[in-house]
Image (tube, helix red, strand yellow):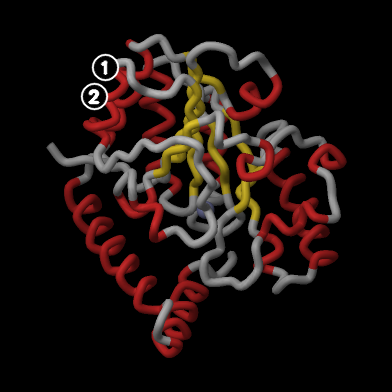
């Protein structure tokens, strides 16, 4: 069976449900009691907003509420999709990258952050934000919070700042694998758990055997698809991208070309 399809995503959700996990949105997780077995499904909608909607519908059909973080770039910021995801009862948050877009100018970044937060609040009363890794930028978007407080903006949480990953098990599907973290540039966390998985099936097995941590934060991007052509194309692209990323670490020329390509691809609307 192909992994990272909606079918395999469903097996993961069902495994959590059957093992008695409660699904919380990130906002609920930050503000309500998260005793017992709880899991937050966090989706960074970096691109392919249409896929996010398909995941949102599947979750809704199973009675699961998740958290979707949207960017301002056109591949993510699709009003029709955001509206429908809100209508399905999910939480919407802002996947910010203002410091990278403002080339490190904190003042300018804070102005655009506020403006973009207002924009997303026209769809949903946003209480959560989450930084985008901006792997080709030298600026870490989280640095905004060195001089500012989340609460000053009516926010209750930022996964990279307000979660203790020694207590909460964090899993991410970076590069079409659950152990692809080595390809991530910034969205990595210090984990207090010595647990490693490659496939969704391994995770499902571990949950069934009741060996899985009680509190879990899952980051699933929007690359999960049942469309065979898209699935193969995305696998090739991720494979190529991961290799170029590794190569760019030691070759300046490759790094420049790669950064140009990425910047061109994400050009703001
Ligand atoms: Zn992102």
Of residues 129 and 170, which is closer to you in this image?
170
Task: Determine the residue positioned at 40% across, 27% down.
Answer: 57
Task: Determine the residue positioned at 61% across, 40% down.
Answer: 159
Instruction: Say left or right for 218 vs 229.
Output: right
Q: Which residue is mark 1?
A: 209
- Residue 205: mark: 2
For ligand 1, tell me if the residue under mark 1 lies within 8 Å. Answer: no
Give residue 260's position: percent from left, percent from top. Answer: 48, 81
What is the quadrant of residue 107 in the picture? bottom right
- Taking the view exactly as shown, the residue that stands out farthest to the bottom is 253
- Taking the view exactly as shown, the residue that stands out farthest to the left is 1
Of residues 253 and 153, which is closer to you in this image?
253
Rendered view: 137 above or below 80 = below
Quote the CA–CA distance across marks 1 and 2.
6 Å
How busy is the neighbourhood of tag 2: few (under 14 within 10 Å), some, or many (20 plus)? some
Instruction: Say left or right for 8 vs 189.
Output: left
Which image quadrant: the C terminus? bottom right
Of residues 52 and 160, which is closer to you in this image?
160
- Residue 31: mark: none
Give residue 194's position: percent from left, percent from top. Answer: 40, 37
User: Tags 1 and 2 in contact by the CB under 8 Å rule?
Assistant: yes
Of residues 215 and 140, which is closer to you in this image?
215
What is the quadrant of residue 137 in the picture? bottom right
* Number of numbered discs on residues: 2
């Amino acid at each position: 069976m192909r992994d990272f399809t909606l079918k395999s995503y469903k097996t993961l959700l069902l495994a959590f449900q059957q093992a008695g996990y409660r699904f919380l949105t990130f906002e609920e997780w930050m503000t309500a009691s998260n005793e017992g077995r709880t899991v937050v499904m966090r989706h960074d909608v970096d691109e392919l907003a249409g896929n996010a909607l398909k995941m949102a519908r599947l979750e809704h059909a199973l009675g699961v509420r998740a958290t979707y973080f949207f960017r301002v770039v056109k591949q993510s910021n699709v009003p029709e999709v955001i509206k429908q995801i809100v209508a399905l009862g999910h939480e919407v948050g802002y996947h910010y990258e203002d410091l990278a877009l403002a080339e490190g100018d904190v003042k300018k970044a804070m102005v655009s952050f506020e403006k973009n937060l207002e924009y997303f609040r026209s769809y949903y009363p946003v209480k959560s934000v989450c930084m985008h890794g901006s792997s080709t930028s030298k600026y870490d978007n989280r640095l905004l919070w060195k001089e500012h407080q989340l609460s000053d903006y009516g926010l209750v949480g930022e996964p990279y700042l307000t979660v203790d990953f020694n207590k909460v098990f964090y899993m991410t599907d970076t590069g079409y694998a659950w152990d692809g973290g080595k390809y991530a540039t910034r969205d990595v966390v210090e984990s207090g758990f010595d647990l490693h998985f490659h496939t969704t099936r391994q995770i499902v097995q571990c949950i069934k055997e009741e060996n899985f941590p009680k509190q879990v934060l899952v980051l699933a991007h929007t690359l999960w698809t049942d469309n065979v052509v898209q699935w193969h194309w995305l696998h090739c692209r991720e494979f190529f991208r991961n290799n170029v990323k590794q190569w760019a670490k030691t070759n300046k020329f490759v790094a420049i070309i790669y950064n140009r390509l990425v910047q061109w691809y994400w050009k703001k609307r």
